Image (cartoon, rainbow, N blue to C red):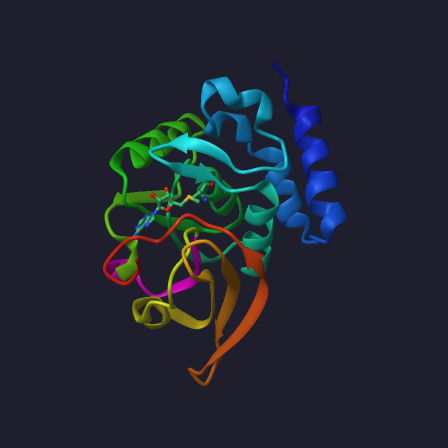
């Protein structure tokens, strides 16, 4: 089945028409085969404007959410990125396409293994995935130029701020269990943090030591 027409329509109507202008992000989403990251019975829905179940009571994020979070990192290609919540691996693949290296943490081993399989099949070799509690970050590999958190947190874990490099950007949904605000926190050259509210969002909870 050729999904390229559905993928192009997704990028034009759900992403570009809603104001995402970063051509690199649009190109990445035109390239990565999203249908490979969903359950086989749901492949026909892979390019719809929706989150979809991926098993273990978790979801693959809506395409517009993936595009918005990625665009907020303003990637140029040289960055080392930490991703929390690998899930299906789709967002990981987009980041892998746009940055130098991606370090991704997933707390559910089955999902981490599934994601690894698809990413290997696509020969994406600049990705390290580890299983564990991502709320404490990945100290051995810090600092990062970008940190993308794909689950809703009650607050901003201190470890993420500490593991963010100067000029780095952290994108994280913060709020209660049902609704959050997507925040972008930039680490300025003087070491201070600038916080921006990007949009309202709904993520599954970030579960762990510094989460729920
Ligand atoms: N962006 C992903 C995708 O494209 O498929 C979707 C991520 S899904 C909305 C959130 C993921 O975060 C789930 O797979 C969940 O298991 C994971 N998660 C929740 N708490 C976590 C934690 N403390 N550490 C690592 N992963 C966590």
Q: Nearer the viewer, residue 58 or 165?
A: 58
Residue at 73% x, 46% y is 16
Numbered disc total: 0
Q: Quadrant of residue 34?
A: top right
Give x and y (percent) for residue 95. Answer: 49, 47
Give x and y (percent) for residue 46. Answer: 57, 28
**As drawn, is 8 to the left or to the right of 184?**
right
Residue at 54% x, 22% y is 43
Give x and y (percent) for residue 24. Answer: 64, 48
Residue 80 visible from this viewpoint: yes
* Bounds of the magenta segment: 138-149
Going by the picture, which residue comes out furthest to the bottom?
190
Residue at 39% x, 38% y is 58
Residue at 28% x, 58% y is 138
* Residue 9 within the segment the image draws in magenta: no
Q: Is residue 187 above or below residue 99?
A: below
Residue 75 visible from this viewpoint: no
* Residue 143 within the segment the image draws in magenta: yes
């Amino acid at each position: 089945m050729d999904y390229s027409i559905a993928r192009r329509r997704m990028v034009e109507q759900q992403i570009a028409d809603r104001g995402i202008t970063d051509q690199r992000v649009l190109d990445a989403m035109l390239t990565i085969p999203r249908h490979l990251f969903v359950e086989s019975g749901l492949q026909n829905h892979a390019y719809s404007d929706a989150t979809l179940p991926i098993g273990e009571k978790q979801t693959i994020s809506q395409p517009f959410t993936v595009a918005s979070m990625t665009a907020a990192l303003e990637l140029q290609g040289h960055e080392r990125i930490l991703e929390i919540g690998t899930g299906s691996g789709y967002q990981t693949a987009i980041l892998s396409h746009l940055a130098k290296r991606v370090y991704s943490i997933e707390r559910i081993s089955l999902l981490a293994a599934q994601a690894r399989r698809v990413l290997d099949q696509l020969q994406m070799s600049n990705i390290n995935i580890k299983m564990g509690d991502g709320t404490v970050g990945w100290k051995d590999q810090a600092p990062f130029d970008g940190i993308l958190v794909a689950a809703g947190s009650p607050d901003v874990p201190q470890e993420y701020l500490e593991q963010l490099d100067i000029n780095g950007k952290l994108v994280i949904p913060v709020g209660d269990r049902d609704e959050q605000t997507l925040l972008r926190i930039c680490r300025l050259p003087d070491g201070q943090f600038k916080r921006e509210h990007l949009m309202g969002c709904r993520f599954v909870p970030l579960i762990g030591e510094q989460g729920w």
